[in-house]
Image (cartoon, grey):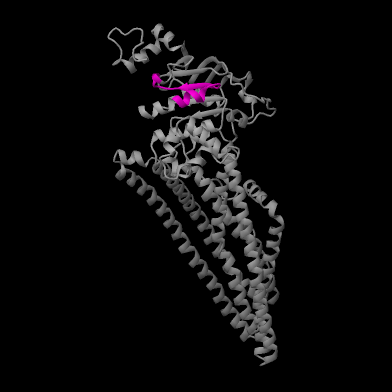
Amino acid sequence: MNPHEEEILGRTYDSRLARRLLSYLKPYRAVAALSVLLTLAVSALQLTGPYLTKLAIDRYILAKNLSGLNLVAGLYLLALLVQFALSYVQNYSMNWIGQRIMSDMRLQIYRHLQQLEVAFFDRNPVGRLMTRITSDVDVLNDLFTSGVITIFGDVFTLAGIVIVIFIMNARLALVTFSVIPALFIATLIFKVRVRASYRRVRTAIARINAFLQENITGMAVTQLFVQEKRKFAQFDERNEEHRAANHQSIFYYSVFYPLSELIGAGAIALIVWYGGNEILAGALTLGSLVAFIQYSERFYKPISDLGEKFNILQGAMASSERIFKLLDTPARVIEPENPAQLPVVRGQIEFRNVSFHYKEDEPVLRNVSFSVSAGEKIAIVGATGAGKSTIINLLNRFYDVTEGSILIDGVDVRRLPLGRLRRSIGIVLQDVFLFSGTVEENISLHDPTINHERIERAARIVNADRVIQKFPERYQRRLNERGSAISAGERQLLAFARCLAYDPTILVLDEATSSIDTETELLIRDGLEKLMQGRTAIIIAHRLSTIQNCDRIIVLHKGEIKEAGSHQQLLAARGIYYKLYQLQYKEQLAPTGTNGESGG
């Protein structure tokens, strides 16, 4: 599936989705009930206006009774004022409910996203997920503020008008409703057309969001390879698709609403023609005719608004289907039902016959077994794609093993609480992620247990303080998104300080020095030696100069462990590690360099 494409929309109305959406009203059912009552009251007051007009004309205007006319006018004004007050409270309460539900739903979606495994984000572009939590939730707000509650008022108003005008004059009522079949046909055609148009609009906006997220994030690459024109053309294509879809939707609305008004006007013309003849025949009063015209206007307005209501319903069904599909996505990495208690983590690690694949029939690790003693420092090396980073992902339970098990202090990581497991492992990745905020906030990540003294100590140990002291604001220096205003080496030094501030038992360095220049690497070597004292450390690196002092080096090749031993032992074995070493240090090696001691 193209990551920039949107899912196909389902049915226009799905009772299962509707019931699930209405469940979000439960915490606010008292306010919702009040809104329904107020809506019914406002609808009832709307019925009084035409009837008061009938009374004013038939009883007082034609009879030239000024006192009675003043009374009816006063009642009409009072009804309008009460209607205004009730409408204000009703609108406020509905929008209050809508905002509360939006807030609840966004929190629910974000909480669920936090629980999903890394593999989910590999499959789903960030732009699409942003659409779920922003645009789709906004669409549901329209349903709760303009759809669910107001439909009660529309139904009550229509029913009340039907009853009143049939009581007043059944034959004229039938004449009034004679145009309903034409309006029904127009609405049906509109519904079919606008559904397809709405699908195009939603698909187009999702494609725009996904494209923008990906290309704004990768803007440096676009500029580096001078791809601005091509990317602009691609965005222009998506933008044009969205514009055309909206224009099509505007066309249908531009036809439907005037057509609805025309049909309503036709009903009024019939009322005037038939009612006028009835007045001339003495079978109908002038007040009744005027009331019929006013009731007809009130009757056809909610019917003509059905197009907008349908659009809201269509959008709500489509958005809810996508949101609930996301919420129903099960987390594959879950908390254990009966977690093991591990008060103190010593740092002993064992991989026992571990196999893993991201895709079926494409194994990344094959029957990998090794152990790391508490406090031991090991390195894992191998060619790109050998499975080095996968080992770290499995240790942190970003993914679960396909076969075998991973144990910490003899306990399977799947039996440990995720928070306890990941708090015990400090990891520094090759691509350091820094948040918008101060240097201090990026080191502590707003953890209240990490005070300023602890932050300074961590920065001092890994020599990050030498970088921080250069900033005029020092620890209060504000960083841009992803730390774009500082160098890659400076970002990685801050990442080392962050890792140490959390004081983990196990340290993982995944290509952590690959982007650091030689001078910066010398700065952190001393800090890393202090950092790793008394801790279990796993170092993944292409640069063999950073791992020669490790207690043990494990060589991965195509997902399997091929060699293991110290630096000197592996060189003496003249296997894969020896070849990797020769490739990196051939200029430093003697022509017959077989022992690998030069350049160590």
Q: Nearer the viewer, residue 492 or 237?
A: 492
Q: Is residue 600 above or below residue 33?
A: above
Give residue 545's position: percent from left, percent from top: 39, 19
Q: Residue furthest bottom?
A: 64
The verdict on residue 261 being magenta is no
Q: Is residue 475 above or below residue 344?
A: below
Give residue 131's position: percent from left, percent from top: 50, 47
Q: Quadrant of residue 328?
A: top right
Give residue 425's position: percent from left, percent from top: 56, 27
Give residue 124's position: percent from left, percent from top: 49, 37
* Residue drawn at 47 percent across, 15 percent down: 554
Q: Nearer the viewer, residue 361 or 114?
A: 114
Q: Quadrant of residue 146?
A: bottom right
Q: Quadrant of the C terminus?
A: top left
Q: Locate residue 18 relative to residue 376 in the image: left or right.
A: right
Q: Nearer the viewer, residue 441 or 563?
A: 441
Q: Locate residue 515 relative to residue 373 in the image: left or right.
A: left
The verdict on residue 535 being magenta is yes
Q: Quadrant of residue 567?
A: top left
Q: Residue furthest left?
A: 591
Is residue 162 in view?
Answer: no
Q: Nearer the viewer, residue 125 or 269?
A: 125
Q: Is residue 584 above or below residue 188?
A: above
Q: Locate residue 534 relative to residue 20 in the image: left or right.
A: left
* Residues drawn in magenta: 526-545
